[in-house]
Amino acid sequence: MSAHLHLRQDNVYPFDARGIAKRFRHAAIFGALDALNSGERMRFVNDHDPLPLLDQLRARYGDAVEIQYLLRNPGEIVIDFIRS
């Protein structure tokens, strides 16, 4: 079977960057975003606002990934990346 099976009916996939070694974070994030289908979202959690990463995402994906802040407090950032 070649169908891509997803286990989440709500189409929201958590991604906690705090548990990933810094040197691997961006590659892991890009890989996770590449795995999303249209309409799915990755709920990204981090301890700082990833502004350089967001610039890289905009350059790489353009309008194919929407960026939606859910929480933007010092030390507590939650962002939904939504694949279009």
Image: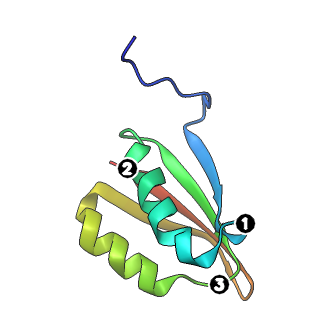
The amino acid sitting under disc 1 is: Gly
Tell me which corner region of the image, top left, top right, bottom left or bottom right, holds residue 49: bottom right
What is the quadrant of the N terminus in the image?
top left
Q: Residues within 10 Å of mark 3 (few under 14, many from 20)?
A: some
Q: CA distance from mark 2 to mark 1?
A: 20 Å
Q: Position of residue 66 (x, y in %)?
A: 38, 61
Label for residue 84? none
Q: Position of residue 41 (x, y in %)?
A: 50, 49
Q: Give the labeled residue for mark 1.
A: 19
Label 2 sits on a secondary structure element that is helix
Q: Give the labeled residue for mark 3.
A: 48
The answer to which of 26 and 40 lies nearer the viewer is 26
Q: Position of residue 82 (x, y in %)?
A: 44, 53
Q: Position of residue 19 (x, y in %)?
A: 72, 66
Tell me which corner region of the image, top left, top right, bottom left or bottom right, holds residue 43: bottom right
Q: Give the labeled residue for mark 2.
A: 34
Count of numbered tags: 3
Is residue 21 shown above or below 8?
below
Label 3 sits on a secondary structure element that is loop
Q: CA distance from mark 3 to mark 1?
A: 13 Å
